[in-house]
Image: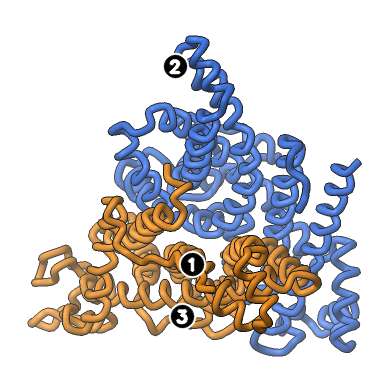
Amino acid sequence: MKAFSAIGARVIQTLFVLWAVVTILFFLFRLMPGSPLAAYIDPNFTPEQQDALMARFGLDKPLWQQYFIYLGNLLQGDLGESFFYRTSVADRIFALLPNTLILTFSSLILAYGIGVLAGAYLAWKRGGAVEQIAIPLVLTTRAMPEFWLGMILLAVFSFSLGWFPAGGTRPPGADYPTLWSLYTSADFWRHMTLPVLTLAIYAQGLPLLLMRSNMLDVMKEDFVTMARIKGLSSYSVVIRHAARNALLPVMTSFAIAVGYQIQGNVVVETVFSWPGLGRELVRAVSASDYPLAQGAFLMIAVVVIAMNLVADLLYAVLDPRVTRE
Amino acid sequence: MNSRRPLRLRLPTHDPLALVGLGIYAVFIVVAVLAPVIAPYDPTEILFTPNYDLAADRRPGEDGFLMGTTTMGRDLFSQLVWGSRSALLIGLTAAFMVALIGSIVGVVAGYFGGWVDTILMRLADVAFGIPFLPFVIVLAAFLEPSIWNVVFAMALVLWRDTGRVIRSQTLTLRTRVYVEAARVSGSSDLKIILRHVVPNILPLSFLYGSIAIGWAILTEASISFLGFGDPKSISWGFMLQDAFASQALSKGAYYWFLPPGVLIILIVSAGFFITRGYEQILFPKLDR
Protein backbone atom coordinates (compact mmCIF):
# COMPACT_ATOMS: atom_id res chain seq x y z
CA MET A 1 0.00 0.00 0.00
CA LYS A 2 2.87 2.30 0.89
CA ALA A 3 4.36 1.73 -2.55
CA PHE A 4 1.13 2.85 -4.22
CA SER A 5 0.94 6.10 -2.28
CA ALA A 6 4.60 6.74 -3.10
CA ILE A 7 3.87 6.30 -6.79
CA GLY A 8 0.79 8.51 -6.50
CA ALA A 9 2.86 11.24 -4.84
CA ARG A 10 5.44 10.99 -7.59
CA VAL A 11 2.78 11.33 -10.30
CA ILE A 12 1.31 14.41 -8.60
CA GLN A 13 4.78 15.89 -8.34
CA THR A 14 5.26 15.31 -12.08
CA LEU A 15 2.02 17.11 -12.87
CA PHE A 16 3.19 20.00 -10.70
CA VAL A 17 6.52 20.20 -12.54
CA LEU A 18 4.69 20.07 -15.88
CA TRP A 19 2.44 22.93 -14.82
CA ALA A 20 5.42 24.95 -13.57
CA VAL A 21 7.36 24.48 -16.82
CA VAL A 22 4.31 25.41 -18.89
CA THR A 23 3.93 28.56 -16.77
CA ILE A 24 7.60 29.48 -17.09
CA LEU A 25 7.25 29.03 -20.84
CA PHE A 26 4.25 31.36 -20.94
CA PHE A 27 6.16 34.16 -19.22
CA LEU A 28 9.41 33.44 -21.05
CA PHE A 29 7.71 33.99 -24.39
CA ARG A 30 6.22 37.25 -23.20
CA LEU A 31 9.61 38.49 -22.12
CA MET A 32 10.98 38.52 -25.63
CA PRO A 33 11.71 41.70 -27.53
CA GLY A 34 8.88 43.47 -29.30
CA SER A 35 5.20 43.67 -28.52
CA PRO A 36 3.55 41.04 -26.32
CA LEU A 37 1.37 40.19 -29.30
CA ALA A 38 4.48 38.97 -31.11
CA ALA A 39 4.16 35.62 -29.36
CA TYR A 40 1.23 34.71 -31.58
CA ILE A 41 0.81 37.28 -34.30
CA ASP A 42 3.08 37.73 -37.26
CA PRO A 43 2.86 41.32 -38.54
CA ASN A 44 2.54 39.85 -42.03
CA PHE A 45 -0.76 38.13 -41.27
CA THR A 46 -3.83 39.75 -42.80
CA PRO A 47 -5.96 41.91 -40.46
CA GLU A 48 -8.66 39.21 -40.44
CA GLN A 49 -6.13 36.55 -39.44
CA GLN A 50 -4.74 38.85 -36.75
CA ASP A 51 -8.19 39.45 -35.32
CA ALA A 52 -8.95 35.75 -35.31
CA LEU A 53 -5.73 34.98 -33.43
CA MET A 54 -6.34 37.86 -31.01
CA ALA A 55 -9.67 36.31 -30.13
CA ARG A 56 -8.31 32.75 -29.99
CA PHE A 57 -5.57 33.60 -27.51
CA GLY A 58 -7.35 36.51 -25.83
CA LEU A 59 -4.47 38.81 -26.64
CA ASP A 60 -6.54 41.93 -26.00
CA LYS A 61 -7.28 40.78 -22.46
CA PRO A 62 -5.16 41.27 -19.31
CA LEU A 63 -2.17 39.01 -18.81
CA TRP A 64 -3.77 36.77 -16.19
CA GLN A 65 -6.74 36.06 -18.46
CA GLN A 66 -4.37 35.32 -21.34
CA TYR A 67 -2.61 32.87 -19.06
CA PHE A 68 -5.79 30.91 -18.38
CA ILE A 69 -6.77 30.95 -22.04
CA TYR A 70 -3.26 29.65 -22.83
CA LEU A 71 -3.66 26.82 -20.31
CA GLY A 72 -7.09 25.98 -21.70
CA ASN A 73 -5.82 25.94 -25.27
CA LEU A 74 -2.87 23.77 -24.26
CA LEU A 75 -5.18 21.21 -22.68
CA GLN A 76 -6.97 20.99 -26.04
CA GLY A 77 -3.64 20.64 -27.84
CA ASP A 78 -3.84 24.08 -29.42
CA LEU A 79 -0.36 25.61 -29.66
CA GLY A 80 -1.11 28.33 -32.19
CA GLU A 81 -0.11 28.81 -35.81
CA SER A 82 3.45 28.71 -37.10
CA PHE A 83 4.44 32.05 -38.69
CA PHE A 84 6.62 30.36 -41.24
CA TYR A 85 4.60 27.31 -42.25
CA ARG A 86 1.19 28.91 -41.73
CA THR A 87 -0.06 25.65 -40.28
CA SER A 88 -0.93 24.43 -36.83
CA VAL A 89 2.11 24.15 -34.56
CA ALA A 90 0.77 20.96 -33.03
CA ASP A 91 0.61 19.25 -36.45
CA ARG A 92 4.14 20.32 -37.26
CA ILE A 93 5.49 19.16 -33.89
CA PHE A 94 3.84 15.76 -34.07
CA ALA A 95 5.11 15.31 -37.63
CA LEU A 96 8.69 15.86 -36.44
CA LEU A 97 8.52 13.96 -33.14
CA PRO A 98 8.95 10.47 -34.71
CA ASN A 99 12.18 11.55 -36.46
CA THR A 100 13.64 12.72 -33.16
CA LEU A 101 12.47 9.66 -31.24
CA ILE A 102 13.87 7.16 -33.73
CA LEU A 103 17.23 8.94 -33.66
CA THR A 104 17.27 9.08 -29.87
CA PHE A 105 16.25 5.49 -29.26
CA SER A 106 18.47 3.94 -31.94
CA SER A 107 21.53 5.75 -30.63
CA LEU A 108 20.77 4.94 -27.00
CA ILE A 109 20.15 1.26 -27.69
CA LEU A 110 23.49 1.11 -29.46
CA ALA A 111 25.18 3.10 -26.67
CA TYR A 112 23.73 0.90 -23.92
CA GLY A 113 24.65 -2.29 -25.74
CA ILE A 114 28.26 -1.21 -26.08
CA GLY A 115 28.42 0.54 -22.70
CA VAL A 116 27.06 -2.37 -20.66
CA LEU A 117 29.34 -4.94 -22.27
CA ALA A 118 32.44 -2.75 -22.07
CA GLY A 119 31.63 -1.70 -18.51
CA ALA A 120 31.27 -5.32 -17.39
CA TYR A 121 34.50 -6.21 -19.15
CA LEU A 122 36.38 -3.32 -17.50
CA ALA A 123 35.11 -4.32 -14.05
CA TRP A 124 36.24 -7.89 -14.67
CA LYS A 125 39.70 -6.75 -15.80
CA ARG A 126 39.96 -4.25 -12.95
CA GLY A 127 43.39 -2.78 -12.28
CA GLY A 128 44.87 -3.89 -15.58
CA ALA A 129 46.50 -2.02 -18.42
CA VAL A 130 43.19 -1.94 -20.31
CA GLU A 131 41.67 0.11 -17.52
CA GLN A 132 44.55 2.58 -17.55
CA ILE A 133 43.76 3.43 -21.16
CA ALA A 134 40.02 2.88 -21.28
CA ILE A 135 38.88 5.09 -18.40
CA PRO A 136 40.60 8.30 -19.59
CA LEU A 137 39.37 7.49 -23.10
CA VAL A 138 35.78 7.19 -21.94
CA LEU A 139 36.06 10.42 -19.95
CA THR A 140 37.39 12.08 -23.09
CA THR A 141 34.31 11.08 -25.09
CA ARG A 142 32.21 12.74 -22.38
CA ALA A 143 34.27 15.92 -22.81
CA MET A 144 33.62 16.15 -26.57
CA PRO A 145 31.22 18.70 -27.95
CA GLU A 146 28.67 16.42 -29.66
CA PHE A 147 28.29 18.71 -32.67
CA TRP A 148 32.06 18.72 -33.18
CA LEU A 149 32.15 14.93 -33.22
CA GLY A 150 29.35 15.08 -35.78
CA MET A 151 31.35 17.53 -37.90
CA ILE A 152 34.40 15.26 -37.85
CA LEU A 153 32.36 12.17 -38.84
CA LEU A 154 30.69 14.22 -41.57
CA ALA A 155 34.01 15.51 -42.94
CA VAL A 156 35.64 12.07 -42.92
CA PHE A 157 32.87 9.63 -43.85
CA SER A 158 30.69 11.85 -45.99
CA PHE A 159 32.81 14.51 -47.66
CA SER A 160 36.20 12.76 -47.85
CA LEU A 161 35.23 9.09 -48.26
CA GLY A 162 31.73 9.54 -49.64
CA TRP A 163 30.38 6.52 -47.73
CA PHE A 164 27.38 8.26 -46.22
CA PRO A 165 25.08 11.14 -47.23
CA ALA A 166 25.74 14.55 -45.70
CA GLY A 167 22.36 15.15 -44.12
CA GLY A 168 18.60 14.83 -44.13
CA THR A 169 16.59 11.61 -44.05
CA ARG A 170 16.30 10.75 -47.74
CA PRO A 171 17.90 11.52 -51.09
CA PRO A 172 16.60 14.65 -52.82
CA GLY A 173 13.43 13.88 -54.75
CA ALA A 174 12.84 10.52 -53.10
CA ASP A 175 9.26 10.18 -51.96
CA TYR A 176 7.94 7.78 -49.37
CA PRO A 177 4.17 7.70 -49.02
CA THR A 178 4.15 6.73 -45.33
CA LEU A 179 6.45 7.17 -42.38
CA TRP A 180 6.71 3.41 -42.12
CA SER A 181 7.92 2.99 -45.69
CA LEU A 182 10.52 5.70 -45.05
CA TYR A 183 11.77 4.18 -41.80
CA THR A 184 12.10 0.73 -43.36
CA SER A 185 14.00 1.95 -46.42
CA ALA A 186 17.74 1.36 -46.79
CA ASP A 187 18.18 5.02 -47.74
CA PHE A 188 16.85 6.14 -44.41
CA TRP A 189 19.26 3.93 -42.47
CA ARG A 190 22.19 5.18 -44.54
CA HIS A 191 21.18 8.75 -43.67
CA MET A 192 20.77 7.84 -40.04
CA THR A 193 24.13 6.09 -39.58
CA LEU A 194 26.32 9.12 -38.89
CA PRO A 195 23.96 10.99 -36.54
CA VAL A 196 23.27 7.78 -34.61
CA LEU A 197 26.98 7.06 -34.35
CA THR A 198 27.65 10.61 -33.12
CA LEU A 199 25.03 10.39 -30.41
CA ALA A 200 26.02 6.84 -29.42
CA ILE A 201 29.72 7.63 -29.04
CA TYR A 202 28.80 10.40 -26.66
CA ALA A 203 26.12 8.44 -24.80
CA GLN A 204 28.03 5.19 -24.16
CA GLY A 205 30.06 6.75 -21.35
CA LEU A 206 27.20 6.86 -18.85
CA PRO A 207 26.13 3.18 -19.03
CA LEU A 208 29.77 2.10 -19.23
CA LEU A 209 30.89 3.92 -16.09
CA LEU A 210 27.68 3.01 -14.23
CA MET A 211 27.93 -0.66 -15.16
CA ARG A 212 31.55 -0.80 -14.12
CA SER A 213 31.07 0.81 -10.74
CA ASN A 214 27.95 -1.27 -10.00
CA MET A 215 29.83 -4.43 -10.93
CA LEU A 216 32.66 -3.48 -8.60
CA ASP A 217 30.12 -2.98 -5.79
CA VAL A 218 28.29 -6.23 -6.50
CA MET A 219 31.49 -8.22 -6.73
CA LYS A 220 32.25 -7.30 -3.10
CA GLU A 221 28.97 -8.82 -1.91
CA ASP A 222 28.62 -12.11 -0.10
CA PHE A 223 26.87 -14.08 -2.78
CA VAL A 224 29.64 -13.37 -5.25
CA THR A 225 32.29 -14.39 -2.74
CA MET A 226 30.19 -17.52 -2.12
CA ALA A 227 30.15 -18.27 -5.82
CA ARG A 228 33.91 -17.95 -5.93
CA ILE A 229 34.31 -20.24 -2.92
CA LYS A 230 32.11 -22.80 -4.63
CA GLY A 231 34.82 -22.82 -7.25
CA LEU A 232 32.81 -21.39 -10.13
CA SER A 233 34.86 -20.08 -13.00
CA SER A 234 35.73 -16.40 -13.12
CA TYR A 235 33.52 -16.01 -16.20
CA SER A 236 30.57 -17.63 -14.53
CA VAL A 237 30.95 -15.47 -11.42
CA VAL A 238 31.23 -12.28 -13.40
CA ILE A 239 28.50 -12.89 -15.96
CA ARG A 240 25.93 -15.07 -14.20
CA HIS A 241 26.15 -13.51 -10.76
CA ALA A 242 27.66 -10.05 -10.78
CA ALA A 243 26.61 -8.67 -14.17
CA ARG A 244 22.94 -9.62 -13.80
CA ASN A 245 22.64 -7.81 -10.51
CA ALA A 246 24.59 -4.80 -11.65
CA LEU A 247 22.42 -4.41 -14.73
CA LEU A 248 19.19 -3.21 -13.10
CA PRO A 249 20.31 0.29 -12.03
CA VAL A 250 21.93 0.76 -15.43
CA MET A 251 18.61 0.00 -17.11
CA THR A 252 16.79 2.63 -15.04
CA SER A 253 19.37 5.17 -16.16
CA PHE A 254 18.16 4.54 -19.72
CA ALA A 255 15.08 6.66 -19.11
CA ILE A 256 17.17 9.53 -17.73
CA ALA A 257 19.47 9.20 -20.74
CA VAL A 258 16.50 9.58 -23.13
CA GLY A 259 15.71 12.88 -21.43
CA TYR A 260 19.29 14.12 -21.69
CA GLN A 261 19.74 12.90 -25.24
CA ILE A 262 16.64 14.64 -26.53
CA GLN A 263 18.08 17.95 -25.31
CA GLY A 264 21.45 17.20 -26.87
CA ASN A 265 19.76 16.35 -30.16
CA VAL A 266 19.34 20.06 -30.74
CA VAL A 267 22.92 20.42 -31.94
CA VAL A 268 23.37 17.05 -33.63
CA GLU A 269 20.15 17.41 -35.63
CA THR A 270 21.39 20.80 -36.79
CA VAL A 271 24.75 19.40 -37.95
CA PHE A 272 23.08 16.62 -39.94
CA SER A 273 20.08 18.69 -41.14
CA TRP A 274 17.91 16.07 -39.45
CA PRO A 275 14.25 17.15 -39.59
CA GLY A 276 13.54 16.71 -35.88
CA LEU A 277 12.28 18.72 -32.93
CA GLY A 278 15.71 20.02 -31.94
CA ARG A 279 16.59 21.50 -35.31
CA GLU A 280 13.08 22.90 -35.57
CA LEU A 281 13.53 24.67 -32.24
CA VAL A 282 16.78 26.26 -33.40
CA ARG A 283 15.31 27.34 -36.72
CA ALA A 284 12.14 28.67 -35.12
CA VAL A 285 14.10 30.70 -32.56
CA SER A 286 16.41 32.13 -35.27
CA ALA A 287 13.44 33.01 -37.49
CA SER A 288 11.42 34.46 -34.58
CA ASP A 289 8.69 31.90 -35.25
CA TYR A 290 7.62 32.13 -31.61
CA PRO A 291 4.62 29.77 -31.57
CA LEU A 292 6.67 27.03 -33.20
CA ALA A 293 9.63 27.60 -30.86
CA GLN A 294 7.31 27.44 -27.88
CA GLY A 295 5.70 24.24 -29.13
CA ALA A 296 9.01 22.51 -29.83
CA PHE A 297 10.36 23.53 -26.43
CA LEU A 298 7.23 22.26 -24.73
CA MET A 299 7.39 18.89 -26.49
CA ILE A 300 11.04 18.42 -25.51
CA ALA A 301 10.21 19.39 -21.92
CA VAL A 302 7.34 16.89 -21.84
CA VAL A 303 9.68 14.08 -22.91
CA VAL A 304 12.27 15.10 -20.27
CA ILE A 305 9.70 15.27 -17.48
CA ALA A 306 8.02 12.02 -18.50
CA MET A 307 11.36 10.22 -18.60
CA ASN A 308 12.30 11.51 -15.14
CA LEU A 309 9.05 9.97 -13.89
CA VAL A 310 9.64 6.68 -15.72
CA ALA A 311 13.14 6.45 -14.23
CA ASP A 312 11.85 6.95 -10.69
CA LEU A 313 9.02 4.46 -11.13
CA LEU A 314 11.31 1.85 -12.69
CA TYR A 315 13.70 2.33 -9.83
CA ALA A 316 10.93 1.79 -7.30
CA VAL A 317 9.64 -1.30 -9.10
CA LEU A 318 13.04 -2.89 -9.61
CA ASP A 319 14.34 -2.14 -6.15
CA PRO A 320 11.56 -2.45 -3.56
CA ARG A 321 13.84 -1.06 -0.86
CA VAL A 322 13.43 2.37 -2.43
CA THR A 323 10.51 4.43 -1.23
CA ARG A 324 10.28 8.10 -1.96
CA GLU A 325 12.13 10.09 0.72
CA MET B 1 33.89 23.26 19.80
CA ASN B 2 36.25 23.44 16.93
CA SER B 3 34.64 21.71 13.97
CA ARG B 4 36.61 19.42 11.76
CA ARG B 5 37.94 21.03 8.62
CA PRO B 6 38.14 18.43 5.89
CA LEU B 7 38.92 21.01 3.22
CA ARG B 8 42.33 19.92 2.09
CA LEU B 9 43.29 21.46 -1.21
CA ARG B 10 46.58 19.71 -1.60
CA LEU B 11 47.92 18.43 -4.88
CA PRO B 12 46.42 15.07 -5.83
CA THR B 13 49.86 13.49 -6.09
CA HIS B 14 48.44 9.96 -5.87
CA ASP B 15 46.62 10.41 -9.17
CA PRO B 16 48.74 11.04 -12.28
CA LEU B 17 45.66 11.88 -14.36
CA ALA B 18 44.64 14.63 -11.95
CA LEU B 19 48.17 16.06 -12.14
CA VAL B 20 47.95 16.04 -15.93
CA GLY B 21 44.63 17.87 -15.62
CA LEU B 22 46.14 20.51 -13.34
CA GLY B 23 49.01 20.94 -15.82
CA ILE B 24 46.56 21.50 -18.68
CA TYR B 25 44.68 24.05 -16.62
CA ALA B 26 47.90 25.89 -15.79
CA VAL B 27 48.84 26.16 -19.48
CA PHE B 28 45.35 27.37 -20.42
CA ILE B 29 45.34 30.03 -17.73
CA VAL B 30 48.74 31.33 -18.83
CA VAL B 31 47.63 31.45 -22.49
CA ALA B 32 44.33 33.15 -21.59
CA VAL B 33 46.04 35.80 -19.49
CA LEU B 34 48.77 36.46 -22.05
CA ALA B 35 46.44 36.23 -25.08
CA PRO B 36 47.19 39.77 -26.36
CA VAL B 37 50.92 39.03 -26.19
CA ILE B 38 50.78 35.55 -27.74
CA ALA B 39 48.31 36.19 -30.56
CA PRO B 40 50.01 37.78 -33.58
CA TYR B 41 46.80 39.39 -34.90
CA ASP B 42 43.47 40.67 -33.70
CA PRO B 43 41.22 37.59 -34.01
CA THR B 44 38.56 39.51 -35.98
CA GLU B 45 40.94 41.44 -38.21
CA ILE B 46 40.62 40.75 -41.95
CA LEU B 47 44.13 40.15 -43.21
CA PHE B 48 45.82 40.80 -46.53
CA THR B 49 49.03 39.57 -48.07
CA PRO B 50 51.80 42.14 -48.87
CA ASN B 51 50.49 42.47 -52.44
CA TYR B 52 46.99 43.32 -51.17
CA ASP B 53 45.29 39.97 -51.81
CA LEU B 54 42.74 38.85 -49.22
CA ALA B 55 44.53 36.20 -47.11
CA ALA B 56 41.58 33.79 -47.34
CA ASP B 57 41.68 30.02 -46.71
CA ARG B 58 45.44 29.91 -46.19
CA ARG B 59 46.67 26.49 -45.11
CA PRO B 60 48.85 26.19 -41.99
CA GLY B 61 52.27 27.74 -42.66
CA GLU B 62 51.20 29.34 -45.94
CA ASP B 63 52.11 33.05 -46.19
CA GLY B 64 53.42 32.87 -42.64
CA PHE B 65 50.06 32.05 -40.99
CA LEU B 66 50.94 29.48 -38.34
CA MET B 67 47.61 27.59 -38.40
CA GLY B 68 46.05 29.05 -41.54
CA THR B 69 43.25 31.55 -42.01
CA THR B 70 39.46 31.53 -42.36
CA THR B 71 37.52 32.20 -45.55
CA MET B 72 37.15 35.78 -44.36
CA GLY B 73 40.91 36.06 -43.98
CA ARG B 74 41.17 35.89 -40.20
CA ASP B 75 44.10 34.29 -38.42
CA LEU B 76 43.14 30.93 -36.90
CA PHE B 77 45.99 30.78 -34.40
CA SER B 78 44.98 34.16 -32.94
CA GLN B 79 41.36 32.99 -32.72
CA LEU B 80 42.40 29.84 -30.86
CA VAL B 81 44.48 31.86 -28.38
CA TRP B 82 41.69 34.37 -27.73
CA GLY B 83 39.17 31.53 -27.52
CA SER B 84 40.93 30.20 -24.42
CA ARG B 85 40.10 33.51 -22.73
CA SER B 86 36.34 33.22 -23.37
CA ALA B 87 36.38 29.55 -22.38
CA LEU B 88 38.02 30.24 -19.03
CA LEU B 89 35.87 33.29 -18.38
CA ILE B 90 32.66 31.38 -19.08
CA GLY B 91 33.80 28.24 -17.28
CA LEU B 92 34.87 30.00 -14.10
CA THR B 93 31.96 32.44 -13.81
CA ALA B 94 29.36 29.77 -14.55
CA ALA B 95 31.00 27.35 -12.11
CA PHE B 96 31.11 30.03 -9.42
CA MET B 97 27.44 30.94 -9.91
CA VAL B 98 26.31 27.31 -9.97
CA ALA B 99 28.30 26.41 -6.85
CA LEU B 100 27.18 29.55 -5.02
CA ILE B 101 23.45 29.25 -5.78
CA GLY B 102 23.47 25.48 -5.28
CA SER B 103 25.27 25.75 -1.95
CA ILE B 104 23.03 28.49 -0.58
CA VAL B 105 19.88 26.62 -1.63
CA GLY B 106 21.21 23.33 -0.27
CA VAL B 107 22.34 24.70 3.09
CA VAL B 108 19.18 26.75 3.66
CA ALA B 109 16.90 23.86 2.67
CA GLY B 110 18.81 21.27 4.69
CA TYR B 111 19.40 23.39 7.77
CA PHE B 112 15.98 24.97 8.20
CA GLY B 113 13.88 22.13 6.84
CA GLY B 114 10.06 22.46 6.94
CA TRP B 115 8.30 24.59 4.37
CA VAL B 116 11.53 26.33 3.31
CA ASP B 117 12.93 22.96 2.38
CA THR B 118 9.72 21.94 0.62
CA ILE B 119 9.62 25.08 -1.52
CA LEU B 120 13.29 24.95 -2.47
CA MET B 121 13.23 21.26 -3.34
CA ARG B 122 10.09 21.63 -5.47
CA LEU B 123 11.95 24.42 -7.27
CA ALA B 124 14.78 21.96 -7.85
CA ASP B 125 12.25 19.46 -9.26
CA VAL B 126 11.08 22.12 -11.70
CA ALA B 127 14.68 22.91 -12.69
CA PHE B 128 15.15 19.19 -13.42
CA GLY B 129 12.11 19.35 -15.72
CA ILE B 130 13.53 22.17 -17.84
CA PRO B 131 15.43 20.98 -20.93
CA PHE B 132 18.78 22.62 -20.33
CA LEU B 133 20.13 23.40 -23.81
CA PRO B 134 16.79 24.53 -25.30
CA PHE B 135 16.30 26.79 -22.29
CA VAL B 136 19.71 28.42 -22.71
CA ILE B 137 19.04 28.86 -26.45
CA VAL B 138 15.70 30.55 -25.92
CA LEU B 139 16.99 32.80 -23.14
CA ALA B 140 20.16 33.72 -25.02
CA ALA B 141 18.12 34.56 -28.11
CA PHE B 142 15.49 36.62 -26.30
CA LEU B 143 17.84 38.53 -24.05
CA GLU B 144 20.72 40.15 -25.79
CA PRO B 145 23.18 37.51 -27.01
CA SER B 146 26.11 37.96 -24.65
CA ILE B 147 28.44 35.83 -22.57
CA TRP B 148 26.73 36.98 -19.39
CA ASN B 149 23.29 35.96 -20.53
CA VAL B 150 24.56 32.49 -21.42
CA VAL B 151 26.14 32.22 -17.97
CA PHE B 152 22.96 33.54 -16.37
CA ALA B 153 20.79 31.00 -18.22
CA MET B 154 23.10 28.15 -17.20
CA ALA B 155 23.13 29.21 -13.56
CA LEU B 156 19.32 29.37 -13.53
CA VAL B 157 19.11 25.65 -14.28
CA LEU B 158 22.33 23.94 -13.22
CA TRP B 159 22.21 24.78 -9.48
CA ARG B 160 19.74 21.88 -9.13
CA ASP B 161 22.32 19.06 -8.85
CA THR B 162 24.56 20.93 -6.42
CA GLY B 163 21.56 22.05 -4.38
CA ARG B 164 20.22 18.54 -3.86
CA VAL B 165 23.58 17.04 -2.89
CA ILE B 166 24.48 19.87 -0.51
CA ARG B 167 21.03 19.63 1.07
CA SER B 168 21.43 15.97 1.93
CA GLN B 169 24.93 16.62 3.27
CA THR B 170 23.56 19.45 5.42
CA LEU B 171 20.81 17.16 6.72
CA THR B 172 23.40 14.75 8.12
CA LEU B 173 25.50 17.61 9.52
CA ARG B 174 22.54 19.10 11.36
CA THR B 175 22.30 16.10 13.65
CA ARG B 176 26.01 16.00 14.51
CA VAL B 177 26.93 16.44 18.16
CA TYR B 178 28.94 19.62 17.69
CA VAL B 179 26.06 21.31 15.86
CA GLU B 180 23.65 20.23 18.61
CA ALA B 181 26.09 21.54 21.20
CA ALA B 182 26.41 24.89 19.47
CA ARG B 183 22.65 25.19 19.28
CA VAL B 184 22.10 24.30 22.94
CA SER B 185 24.77 26.81 24.00
CA GLY B 186 22.79 29.54 22.26
CA SER B 187 24.65 30.17 19.00
CA SER B 188 22.57 31.86 16.35
CA ASP B 189 21.56 29.96 13.22
CA LEU B 190 23.77 32.17 11.09
CA LYS B 191 26.76 31.50 13.29
CA ILE B 192 26.16 27.75 13.28
CA ILE B 193 25.81 27.74 9.51
CA LEU B 194 28.95 29.78 8.94
CA ARG B 195 31.11 28.01 11.53
CA HIS B 196 29.96 24.43 11.41
CA VAL B 197 27.98 23.76 8.24
CA VAL B 198 29.69 25.78 5.53
CA PRO B 199 33.24 24.53 6.20
CA ASN B 200 31.96 20.97 5.91
CA ILE B 201 30.08 21.42 2.65
CA LEU B 202 32.70 23.58 0.93
CA PRO B 203 34.55 20.59 -0.54
CA LEU B 204 31.30 19.43 -2.16
CA SER B 205 30.60 22.91 -3.52
CA PHE B 206 34.10 22.95 -4.91
CA LEU B 207 33.59 19.54 -6.53
CA TYR B 208 30.28 20.46 -8.14
CA GLY B 209 31.65 23.81 -9.21
CA SER B 210 34.52 22.14 -11.00
CA ILE B 211 32.12 19.79 -12.80
CA ALA B 212 30.17 22.86 -13.90
CA ILE B 213 33.27 24.37 -15.55
CA GLY B 214 33.23 21.65 -18.19
CA TRP B 215 29.46 21.84 -18.65
CA ALA B 216 29.63 25.59 -19.10
CA ILE B 217 32.37 25.42 -21.73
CA LEU B 218 30.54 22.70 -23.68
CA THR B 219 27.26 24.59 -23.44
CA GLU B 220 28.76 27.86 -24.60
CA ALA B 221 30.33 26.02 -27.54
CA SER B 222 26.93 24.56 -28.51
CA ILE B 223 25.19 27.92 -28.17
CA SER B 224 27.81 29.70 -30.27
CA PHE B 225 27.75 26.91 -32.83
CA LEU B 226 23.99 27.35 -33.21
CA GLY B 227 24.53 31.07 -33.75
CA PHE B 228 23.15 32.38 -30.46
CA GLY B 229 26.50 33.30 -28.94
CA ASP B 230 28.07 36.64 -28.16
CA PRO B 231 28.92 38.18 -31.55
CA LYS B 232 31.60 40.34 -29.97
CA SER B 233 33.70 37.57 -28.47
CA ILE B 234 35.74 34.96 -30.30
CA SER B 235 35.14 31.54 -28.76
CA TRP B 236 35.96 28.04 -29.94
CA GLY B 237 32.27 27.41 -30.52
CA PHE B 238 32.10 30.50 -32.72
CA MET B 239 35.12 29.24 -34.72
CA LEU B 240 33.33 25.93 -35.31
CA GLN B 241 30.18 27.70 -36.41
CA ASP B 242 32.23 29.86 -38.78
CA ALA B 243 33.93 26.75 -40.20
CA PHE B 244 30.63 24.89 -40.59
CA ALA B 245 28.92 27.84 -42.29
CA SER B 246 31.94 28.44 -44.58
CA GLN B 247 31.84 24.88 -46.01
CA ALA B 248 35.13 23.99 -44.30
CA LEU B 249 33.86 20.41 -44.01
CA SER B 250 33.45 19.81 -47.73
CA LYS B 251 36.72 21.66 -48.42
CA GLY B 252 38.49 19.27 -46.05
CA ALA B 253 39.89 22.20 -44.04
CA TYR B 254 40.68 20.04 -41.01
CA TYR B 255 43.21 22.62 -39.79
CA TRP B 256 40.23 24.90 -39.21
CA PHE B 257 37.67 22.75 -37.36
CA LEU B 258 39.90 20.14 -35.69
CA PRO B 259 41.90 22.36 -33.27
CA PRO B 260 39.00 24.16 -31.51
CA GLY B 261 37.36 20.81 -30.72
CA VAL B 262 40.61 19.31 -29.47
CA LEU B 263 41.15 22.29 -27.17
CA ILE B 264 37.61 21.98 -25.79
CA ILE B 265 38.19 18.28 -25.13
CA LEU B 266 41.52 19.00 -23.44
CA ILE B 267 40.17 21.59 -21.05
CA VAL B 268 36.91 19.78 -20.27
CA SER B 269 38.56 16.41 -19.68
CA ALA B 270 41.24 18.13 -17.59
CA GLY B 271 38.35 19.26 -15.40
CA PHE B 272 37.05 15.68 -15.19
CA PHE B 273 40.47 14.30 -14.27
CA ILE B 274 40.96 16.90 -11.54
CA THR B 275 37.46 16.27 -10.20
CA ARG B 276 38.11 12.55 -9.97
CA GLY B 277 41.41 13.17 -8.22
CA TYR B 278 39.83 15.38 -5.58
CA GLU B 279 36.87 13.06 -5.24
CA GLN B 280 39.33 10.46 -4.00
CA ILE B 281 40.85 12.92 -1.52
CA LEU B 282 37.51 14.21 -0.26
CA PHE B 283 35.62 10.92 -0.26
CA PRO B 284 38.14 8.13 0.23
CA LYS B 285 35.32 5.58 0.46
CA LEU B 286 34.52 6.19 -3.19
CA ASP B 287 38.02 5.15 -4.12
CA ARG B 288 37.79 2.66 -6.92
Image quarter where the N terminus of chain B lies is bottom right
The secondary element bearing badge 2 is classed as helix
Chain A: drawing colour: blue
Is A219 above or below relative to B226? above
Provide the letter of the chain coloured orange.
Answer: B
Q: Which chain carries label 2?
A: A
How far apart in space, not on screen, are marks 3 and 1 (Cα)? Answer: 39 Å
Q: What residue type is labelled 3?
A: Ile
Tell which tag, 2 or 1, sits nearer the viewer: 1
Decide: few, some or many residues near mark 2? Use Cα within 10 Å; few <14, some 14-19, many ≥20. few
The secondary element bearing badge 1 is classed as loop
Task: Give percent across and percent down for residue A70.
Answer: 85, 73
Task: Give percent across and percent down for residue A79.
Answer: 80, 67
Marks 3 & 1 on one chain: yes
According to the picture, the residue beneath numbered tag 3 turns out to be: B147
User: Residue A33 lies in what quarter of the image?
Assistant: bottom right
User: Which disc, if any, is residue A234?
Assistant: 2
The structure residue drawn at horizontal position 55% and vertical position 39%, both measured from the top left corner, is A188
User: Residue A35 lies in what quarter of the image?
Assistant: bottom right
